[in-house]
Amino acid sequence: MNFLDWAAFVVTMAGASGMLLRRDWRWSIALLAAAYLGVFWLVQSPWSISLAAVKLVTGWMVCAALAIAHRNAEEEAGDETAWPQGQLFRLAVIGLVLTVTFAGGIGLASWLGMSLPAAWGGLMLISMGLLHLGVTGQSFRVVLGLLTALAGFEVIYAAVESSALVAGLLALVNLGLAMVGAYFLPRQPEREQP
Amino acid sequence: MSAPAVWVFFPIALGGLLILLRNQRLITLLAGMACVLLALTALLLPIDTSHTIGSLTFRLNPSFEMLGRRLTLADHDRAWLALLYGASAFWFLAASSIQIARRLIPLGLVITGLLVAALAVEPFLYAALLIETAVLLAVPLLSPPDRKPGKGVLRFLIYQTLAMPFILFSGWLLSGIEANPGDLALVARAAALLGLGFALLLAIFPFYTWIPLLAEEVHPYVAGFLLWIFPTVTMFFGLGFLDRYAWLRDSAALPTILTMVGVLMVVSGGLLAFFQRHLGRMMGYAVMLESGFSLLGLGLGGSYGLHTFLLLFTPRLIGLALWALALSNLKEHDANLTLDGVKGAGRIWSFSSTSVVLASLSLAGAPMLASFPAHQAIWEGLARQSLTLTPWVFLGSLGLTISAIRVLASLVSAPDGSPWGARETRSQRVLLLLGWLCLFLLGILPSWVAAFWARLPALFEHLGQ
């Protein structure tokens, strides 16, 4: 079980880090879907599998909604001039985030009685989401950042709250954010029928 | 019939139905009538008491249960319900005069219903989720589908969304404190998280940057409505926290923190308004200043603090609604709403120009206008506590007053011989005149509104005792 927890952490970390490194929207959505898979596993130990599955289904619905909207949208212009674009720099920042959240994760795990992979994973997702929000001005990437940060919060919150209604409302908020992300995307002009 | 069905589900359902309609007048009429009716019902019909109309006998049950959780609207909630729906009627009825009813009203009504639900839900931590849902619904209002969302809209979404986890988590910590009130480490953590959550929700320094951006990017009337309803409901939500938790209410540090943050908001709001050249941004900074005054009122503590805090609500509503309506009219003169762009507009948009100046002077706390009695009470209370801080608050108000004078100078600087006129429609003139009348009446006779608010402190069992 512990090995699987660490595997879920690695999947989550790879997803969240990849979203910062890859600029292509297809990759970003696929990596978000992978992160949700990790979140599902990290949440299922304090919750039941059936309740944790809500997170997975909702997460993948969010990814599907964003992907469908993106397919019908024009490419969004970049707005990240204030942030160094080099991959090496981003990798260094990701490394820094992992180090800092590891220290925080140990304290959080002992405070809330969570497993270390879940506590570290939750904090790491929150930090990666905030980092994403700090470096982008693109509406699609802002929504990705918010979804990532919320996913991290949900991992930590699952350790203290197991209400089905809260899970349902959080799922609704995630879906609402996906709808907002889809709404923000510039629509392609409709093609005339021959 | 339950009270939440009347004040929560009915407006949400009506808002959903109104999305399907296209006729602006019909939408305004239905929503306006519904809001007036809901406000009157709140004023006149006691909850949890049997009523007989002819052969019909009914009773409004205070609670509605859903999946083991409850929405509760008790009899003492009627005053704020009347305020919220009366004010919404005010906003919605004026929306038709500037052709924005179809965009604002249906979603505005759903948002109002959701925010009422946020104040009624038990356990209260669910409120954060309902407020977030209302925030997500506000996005289509702020950013029309054919336009790229601006920085203000994105920051609004980010800050309001990030507030939700803080409130939810602090809710869990607070329940732990109830069980173990001596755990000081837990108290400190809960207070820090709660403070951050409310700082994000209320756009308290330094999380205020979205307010001026939003007020610049978005239609002024939509910005005005959202900048009124979200802070108002969040403040009631915050008061609920203070009322519920004795350790928070009795904390020695709380009045100092509220006062210092309030002073910071008033000074930064007023001074930054002074440096603006965009009329919408000035309105945004005025909202900041008003939030600062609310915090100052709360920081005064006791019954005096609570009463001054509540006294601010009506002047803020009227000042902001009048300002937003007038800016919406001036937008026809200059779409950018800059000081240079509106030069001379006072000659041809005389009602709107006068309204902008009066509303900004009122929110700055100028004598004879609506906000003056509440601001004066806060100055007086603050001066009793600290003579060092009072001049700073005065400086903030002075900043907004000078910005109002700058706007006036720009509006009237037309070439000699330019004709005077009023391009506003008759309904716009009537609404603006009504706003002037309210500003002066509340400024001269504040006891009228104070009598209404006298019922509100009963809502809070412990606060202000």
Image (cartoon, rainbow, N blue to C red):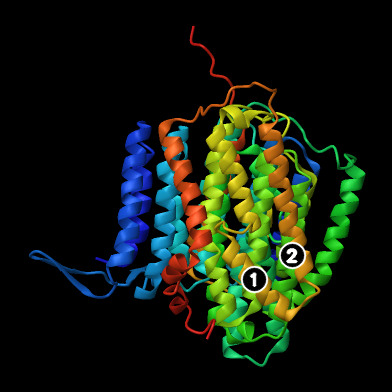
Q: Are marks 1 and 2 in contact (CB under 8 Å)?
A: yes
Foreground residue among A174 and B374: B374
Residue B167 falls left or right of residue B281: left
Q: Position of residue B101 (x, y in %)?
A: 43, 37
Find residue B214 and report its image quarter: top right
Q: Position of residue B299 (x, y in %)?
A: 66, 75
Q: Position of residue B62 (x, y in %)?
A: 32, 72
Say which residue label 2 marks: B393
Circle 2 residues within 10 Å: few <14, some 14–19, many ≥20: many
The vertical placement of B186 against B198, above or below, is below
The vertical placement of B346 against B120, above or below, is above
Q: State the residue at coordinates (64%, 32%).
A: B148
- Residue with the most extreme left position: B55
Q: What kind of element bears circle 1?
A: helix
Say which residue label 1 marks: B378
Q: What kind of element bears circle 2?
A: helix
* Same subunit: marks 1 and 2: yes
